[in-house]
Amino acid sequence: MKNVKIAMFGIILVGMHLASCKKDVKQQVQQATPSENKAQLFEKSLTVYSADKALSTTLHIKAATPELLNKVSSMKFTLSANVQAPKSQVTTLPADEGIAAFSKGVTLLPHNVSTPKPDLSEKAIQIEAPDLPKVANMALNVSSADEAVAAGPADIEAFFYRSGWHYIEVLNRHRRSIGVDFYSFFRGQWRYSGYSFELFRNQSAWFQHCSRTVGADVFYVAAHNFTVFYVHFC
């Protein structure tokens, strides 16, 4: 009888240990998945295609309000696969929060990691590109859905990322400048890297962090045309 009780006690301990392990794994998975704003987010999925329609994928889009989510209708997305990011970078900025570089003439805005800056803004429309196992590198061109739209104030903010990818680059193709802040995903939240840039036409900037998912927060006007590159690097 005593042996039976000992055996039962051992089974209970093993069961408690397994439950604890499952809970820890679940928490680690949740923390490792890039997500922002614990409040309710409005979501939609959008299928995008390459110019020749040979390739397609589905973007996962989230925003804090339906009004912000509706702004996606002003954007035209075109997908490209197995691309090479621009090679025009001439200046590199290494730091503990990652490495950034930018092409000639780019304006490095006066921000750094010691400057107080809030987490990713609730005004940002979050656009996640899914992982495509058969696609080594990909690019997402983002342009005005209506080419005749008037250039208004920089009232659109979109945050681009691809879970598990450690290199991201933004190239501006429009005559109007765009702003870019780079982030990395750390301990369950998006962390500002300290790198902010203003990009004019044909200027680009990139950011990498070899142990974190990275993202680019882009500020632009109603009339726009830029490309986001997701490239395997580390």
Image (cartoon, grey):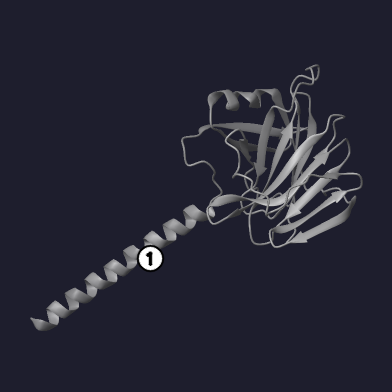
* Quadrant of the snapshot with the N terminus: bottom left
Residue 100: % across, % down: 78, 54
Is 42 placed left or right of 232 in the picture? Answer: left
Residue 94: % across, % down: 77, 61
Secondary element type, mark 1: helix
Residue 150 in the image: above or below residue 94? above
- Residue farthest toward the front in the current orientation of the protein: 115
Residue at (67% x, 33% y) in the render: 157
Residue at (32% x, 69% y) in the render: 17
* Quadrant of the snapshot with the C terminus: bottom right
Residue 208 in the image: above or below residue 72? below
Residue toward you, 59 or 63: 63
Is 73 placed left or right of 28 in the picture? Answer: right
Residue at (38% x, 61% y) in the render: 22
Is 17 placed left or right of 213 in the picture? Answer: left
- Residue farthest toward the bottom in the current orientation of the protein: 3
Is 124 placed left or right of 171 in the picture? Answer: left
Q: In which quarter of the image is residue 141?
A: top right
Residue toward you, 142 or 54: 142
- Residue farthest toward the left in the current orientation of the protein: 1
Residue 72: % across, % down: 65, 27
- Classify mark 1: residues with Cα within 10 Å, few (<14), some (14-19) or many (20+): few
Residue 165: % across, % down: 67, 53
Q: Quadrant of residue 181?
A: top right
Q: Mark 1 is on which residue type?
A: Cys
Q: Residue beneath label 1, please? A: 21
Residue 64 in the image: above or below residue 83? above
